[in-house]
Structure formats: C-alpha cells, structure tokens
Image (spheres, grey):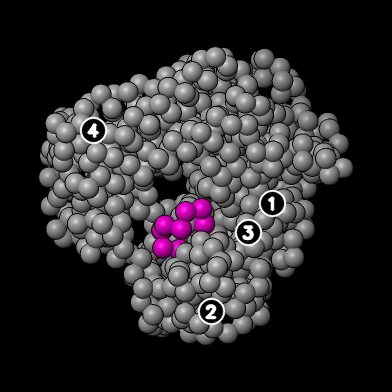
Amino acid sequence: MAMAVTQTLEQGGQLVVEAGTGVGKTYAYLVPVLLSGQRALVSTATKALQDQLFSRDIPRLVEVLGLPIRVALLKGRSNYLCLHRMQQARHSAESAQPGAQKALAKIETWSQSTRTGDMAELTGLDERSSLWPLVTSTRDNCLGSSCPSYRACHVNLARKEAMASDVVVINHHLFFADMAVRESGVAELLPTVRVTVFDEAHQLNEIGVNFLGKQFSTVQLLELSRDVLATGLQLARGLVDWHALADRLEKTSRDLRLSAGMHRGSVRLRWTEAIPEGVEAEDWTAALAQLVQALGQLQTGLEMVTELAPDFQRLHERASELAQKAHLFSQAPDPEGVRWAEVSAQLRLIESPLDIAQAFSTLTRPAPVRLSNEAQPNSDSDPDSLEALMAGDPRHGAEDPAGAAAGVGAGVGQRAWIFTSATLGDEPSLRWFTEPCGLTSAQVMQVTSPFDYAQQAALYVPEHLPKPGDPGHAGHVAQLVVEAVALLGGRTLVLTTTLNAMRSIGEYLQTRLDPAANVEVLVQGQSPKRRLMERFREGGGDGRAGCVLVASASFWEGFDVPGEALQLVVIDKLPFPPPGDPLFEARSQRITREGRSAFADHALPEAAVSLKQGAGRLIRSETDRGVLVVCDTRLATMSYGRRLVRGLPEMRRLNGHPEFLETLRQLTTDATKGSIF
C-alpha cells in the first residue's frame, strides 16, 4: 500500500485502497506523504480520528523521521470559541439557567489563556450543552469582517495557521461544507495542495449528498428566533417589538413540525409530489404559508435597524436565505435529485443529488497545482465554481502568499488523490465506492488483513432460528445471547439493524439474565455513547461485572475493542437498507432505468459492506479470538448468501449449535492460548 501511495504521489492521479484490519493503513499513507515533501490535506470521517492523527500519529512519525514539517488542525467553526458571541452570552435567556453563569465564567477565564480557541480544550462542557451554541458561531450567525472581534477570531487564526502549514488535518464534513458554501477556509487551501488523502473514505458519498443538497430545518428557524430576540433586546430595545416577531417565527416553525404528523423516533417521508407523503395537504400548505409570512414580517422589522449594528444586517440575511428555502420547498421537487422530509423532534427538509459523482469527478480531474496566484481564468467565470477552485482562481488565493508556497514541490505535476478505508465494497473492482464518488478511472487495490482469521475467528449461522421477518425473531436472538453470555460471562456485542430490535433485545436481556451471571447489560441510548464504550472496554474482572452491549447504527463501525473484552459479536439480521428510505428508493429506480438490477447492484452491495463493517468489530489485533453470529438464515439458505459470506474475512464455519457452544467454552477456559481451534 505504501508503495502504491508513493507511486501516486510521484505521478498524480487517483488511488483507491481497501486496507483490511491490521494493515496499518494510517502509517501506510502518512509515511510516503510526509517523506514526499508535498503539501497535503488529510481528511477523516470523525473528529476523534482527526484528533488522533494530529495529536498522536503525525507527531510520532515526524519525530521518528526527523522531518521539519508544520502540521495544522482545522475544524468546523462551531468547534472554536467566538469571542463576540461569548461577550453577548450573559444577556441571553439561556444564561439564566442554573449553573450557566458559573459555566460562562469558566469559559471566560479559559478564553484569556487559550491559543487556539478549540472548544475540545475546555473540559466539563459537552457540545450538547445549551451554552455551546451561545459561545461558538455558525455560518449563519458569523458577522465576518464586520465583527468587532474579527482580528482576534480563532477561526481566522486557525485558517491562517492551516495556510502556512505543510500538512493540514480536516474532516469530511468540513470538506463538503466548504464545497457547498466556500466558508471554512478549505477553498483557499485546496488550490495550493498537491496531495489530498481521505481516510475512512467509505463515508464520503453519504456525507457528501447531505452537504451538496439543500436543507431547511426547524432548528435553523428556532435559532434565528432566539438570536433575533437576544440581539434585538440588547442592541435595539424598544425600536421594534422583538418579542412578537420572535414568538411568531417560533410558533409557525413548531406548527410546521406538527403538520408533519406524530412519529416514533426518526423517520424519512418520501416527497415526490408537492408535499411529503402521509402529510395532510391542507395543514402542511397552511403551516408553510404562515411560516413564509412570519419570515417576511421579521425581514421588515430588521430592515428598520440594519444600520445600527452588523448583527442586524446578518440576521436580515439569514431571514432572507430561510425565506428563499421555504419558497423552494413549497415548489415541486427537482426531478434530477431526491427530496424527503426527516421527522423527529425537529423537522428537516432535504433535497440532494443521488450521489457525489458529478461534483467529485470535477473536483478530482487532472489539474496542475499552483504555487501562488499564477492562474488567470476567464474573468467572467464564477469564483465559487469547482472549476475556478481547482484551477487556482486568484479570488480564492491565500491571504499569506508565503504560506501558499509552503509545500515543497507544489506547482509541478498533477494532484494526487488517495482514498482508503477498511471497507470499500464487496468485490475487487470496489464499484460500491468508486461509482457514486465519480472515481471510475481510479487505480484500485485491496490489501488483505494480516490476521489469521481461520485460526482466530469462527462464523456461526443458527439455522434453527425463525425467519428474520417473524415477529418472534428478536426474542429468539435474545435467548441465544442469554445462552452464550452464561458461558462467556459477558464479552458480547449485539448489533441490530433497527432501533426496535435493539430495545426489544436489550429489555429482554436486562430482565431475563440470571443475576448470578454477574453481567451488566448496556443498551445504546441509556447512557452517553462515550461512557458505554469506556465501560464495555473495561470488561469484567477486578470486582467488575462482565458486559453485554446492545447497540445499533453508529456502533457498527469505528468501535474498537481489542483484547478479551469482546469475543462474541451477534448480528440480528442482514443489514439491507430499509425499503422505505427515499434516498435508497431513488437510487434503486435510477439503476432500474439503466437496465440493471436494483437488488444485485445496490441493495446487496450495501448489505455486504454493512455486514463487513459489523463483522470487523470482532478481531482487532493478532491475538484476538472470537465468534461472529449472524442470526439470519438467509445467509445460509439464499443464493446471494454466498456472495455476502465471500465479502467477510475467511473465518472457520461452525456447523450446528453444539459446536457453537463448545467454541464458547473454549474461549472461556482457554483464553490465554493463541488459538481457539
């Protein structure tokens, strides 16, 4: 893998690498990138890996290799303290909550000493706290160069640091947010970068379609209402009836959410006609019209005071932007994309492309790298277009020309694009990843895991269980887990495909497990995710109970538990995409129109990748041992089951329930040996 990355760095182009668990893919791309002397951008899917790269992996390699490399970390603006909003925070309604003044005082004290303004430095304040948005900014409420604290702005300082660095670490959300609105600093950075690496690249398409489309949410509306009230009362009290305007906007926003109906959990509603499916047309149309009217009244009120402070000008712009989006979603959907309504406690309206192929193929096509403002595209071109961005439009130029020239070797050759992940498809061509990302001409390679799965792991498909569609299926899965946990004393991760199954299995285990087994049942949603992960990794021993974790969604990937704390992974059903999902349906319809099979070319690869990710939780080091149980008889009885099994690591197959139980006994009694078979 390192040699392939090196070749791509030298020649330019696109390289897609699926690197199995244990390959060491992070070092396999970092070492060549650092040694190349090229200016590089490294993007990850999560802030956790972003911090790990910046704080641990890159510094370790820089020290070992003895390289004079300057590295910067760039996050989205909501991760940085906003000095202007911090000064206003004490006047907000939220500051009257118990403990808020004390927390604000702690933030103010920290603000005097922090160099970066990165909120991750501030211990004790969770990003879900109601105070977080009061002391950070968003694209919506940032005042830009009109802000009185502009020169000391931590976001701008972070961007300047990035422009002067050799390697910049970002995340996919920031990358795509910048592609959509050109506001985070990546737009200035890209034309000067020779190498771009996407780690955890399997998430690129799903993250991308969310950012490259259009969104309109009640969260945006309620935040605007709150900001209007706070700013109006502080800077223009008595000039406008701020309470009336804010209350009207809040009420009409909540009425729009109510018109979408009551649903348990979060649901996506199809939207192929004028309104979302399952919604009362009269209620929806009236609620949307009232909301548009409330936004119009708000704009009129703000126009009276826009000259008083830049805050009011920005609020007026936000109200206008939201009014335009409300108008968009009152029209028929774009036939080239897909539209849906996401209904939970809040309401989010989304219209997006089906994939990122068009945007990404434009972005990654061959283009020379500029050292400075040497490119002179047509003066009539759109400065925010991808073409201008990648050609090095001087209007996207670095504020610091010296910083733009920091990378050795920039200005020669073609850009190099590296995409890597442990899971990028279920076949050698990796079409599952390359097609929706517009990377059909990329060089593709698979690097298999060095682990000996045949010795370290086993696969069991319990064929005595009812079919996955049977109402009693979850209960039978729970019974199997109870039986297994009695032998293992915990050390079990149960991954479900639905929240209902997760709750059902979790409740069963919490009420039916024998207290004498000394096993603690952890269920996603009953504690913060970080606490669940920490407790599960602790495992049993030293007076602690063993652990069973029942989880869904985010625990299928990115959850690593090396060692004996995890030796059994139970998957309740094959993870096919939910059939009613609007995005999945629209993609399937497009594939059918192209004369291909929506099942074989879309549903099956999606299930294979998800299954591969879930199975990947089991073996995380060369000494790990364990069993993967897939409680779905289709894996053994349907013809496509063979394709799904081929996508998994080559584990030993267990034949029957007695052999499964015996294997668990071996794990329990012979855990210190190097092999369980």
Query: Which residue, given by chain and number where applicable, does mark 2 sit on?
Result: 375
On whether residue 110 falls in the magenta region, the answer is: no
Circle 3: is it few (<14), some (14-19), or many (20+) Cα within 10 Å?
some
Q: Secondary structure at mark 1?
A: loop
Query: Which residue, given by chain and number where applicable, does mark 1 sit on?
Result: 436
N-terminal of the pair, mark 4 or mark 3, is: 4
Image coordinates for residue 443, horizontal then vertical, percent: 72, 68
Image coordinates for residue 346, horizontal then vertical, percent: 44, 27
Question: Residues at badges 4 and 3 in contact (C-beta under 8 Å)?
Answer: no
Question: Residues at badges 4 and 1 in contact (C-beta under 8 Å)?
Answer: no
On the rendered structure, is 568 left or right of 99? Answer: right
Q: CA distance from mark 4 to mark 3?
A: 41 Å
Q: Which residues are magenta?
A: 179-186
Query: Which residue, given by chain and number where applicable, does mark 3 sit on?
Result: 360
Q: CA distance from mark 2 to mark 1?
A: 30 Å
Q: Is residue 414 above or below residue 611?
A: below
